[in-house]
Image (cartoon, rainbow, N blue to C red):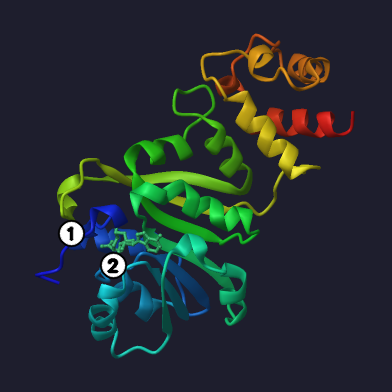
Amino acid sequence: MKRFEFKKSLGQNFLHDQNIIHKIVDSADIDKNSLVIEVGPGGGALTELIVPLCGQALLYEADRRLESSLQQLLYQYSNYEIIFGDFLEADLSSDLKRYHYDKLYVVANLPYYITTPIIMKFIDENIFPDQMVIMVQKEVAYRLAAKVGTKDYGSLTVFLNYYYDIQKLFDVSRNCFTPKPNVDSAVIRMNLKEERLKVNNIDLFKSLVRDSFLYKRKTLRNNLKGYNLEIVASVLSKYGFDLSVRAENLSLEIFVEMANELVSQ
Ligand code: SAM
């Protein structure tokens, strides 16, 4: 990998810190019955630890220049497949149909420029990995694991927390990467919830959450002008709030109840 020309446009910051690499893979519950998806194996830092542990590994890499080094690194294994191309364009459902597995995991050091689209691709395609252990930009980690009432709590927090229990595991200094990025990172673990709250119309729930946070400093009265505010107010009053509340103070449960009441109006 010594003379490799890193592409900034592909978010190529490869991990070199062995302690962190092991810590990430150890944080996932990989076993021989699992299929592990890694988006962006790069030079294979995580991959070479994942492949021996899992049943099958499905690797998506945008950069074909990495093909021979990945193949050399993994030459003794046959339980992996590399798909070259843009993960966001992949036909995930049909790729997954080729595999039999008990659990589906995602373990990855994600390219920062498309972290959210990558996570949302799974959700939007109705593919719910049992667990995701992913390295993301530190701010994103704080946002996803934020508690209600804090400044980091946003629409993505609420929406993803509907499906997943999200925990920030540890911070990773920029010095652990080659080349060194301009931002610090953190690793989060997302465990699929065994029981979800019942949402009657997921699209409405999604737009309600997104619109509630549209202008962060504004109240629900302002952000939800297009909705039936009487219904919104009646749900809020059950929890001791009124329309002057800001979205950051509302729990997942309140959003779910508002969405369900709005759908049955
Ligand atoms: N996993 C390696 C590591 O930890 O050292 C590399 C991680 S690096 C932050 C991100 C990787 O994602 C790079 O290998 C990059 O080429 C790849 N990548 C970037 N955009 C991608 C995309 N749209 N689809 C698939 N892989 C992508």
Residue at (27% x, 71% y) in the render: 44
Give residue 243's mark.
none
Q: Is residue 143 above or below residue 190?
A: above
- Which residue bears the numbered disc 2? 42
Mark before the other along the chain sequence, 2 or 1: 1
Whether the residue under disc 2 has CB within 8 Å of ligand 1: yes
Give residue 17's mark.
1
Q: Is residue 111 above or below residue 138?
A: below
Q: Amino acid at mark 2?
A: Gly
Q: Quadrant of the N terminus?
A: bottom left
- Residue 246 lies left or right of residue 255; in this view the side is left
- In percent of width and height, residue 6 lies at 19, 60
Q: Which mark lies nearer to you, 2 or 1?
A: 2
Residue at (52% x, 22% y) in the render: 149
- In percent of width and height, residue 37 lies at 46, 69
Q: Quadrant of the C terminus?
A: top right
- Residue 187 lies left or right of residue 235; in this view the side is left
Q: Amino acid at mark 1?
A: Asp
- Residue 155 sits in which quadrant? top right
In this view of the protein, can residue 145 be seen by the observer? no
- The residue tagged with tag 1: helix, strand or loop? loop
Residue at (29% x, 45% y) in the render: 185
- In percent of width and height, residue 54 lies at 43, 77
- Residue 18 sits in which quadrant? bottom left
- The residue tagged with tag 2: helix, strand or loop? loop
Q: Is residue 41 above or below residue 230?
A: below
- Residue 159 lies left or right of residue 89; in this view the side is right
In this view of the protein, can residue 203 be seen by the observer? yes
Q: Quadrant of ligand 1?
A: bottom left
- Residue 1 lies left or right of residue 130; in this view the side is left
Residue at (16% x, 49% y) in the render: 180
| Foreground of the two, 131 or 209 | 209
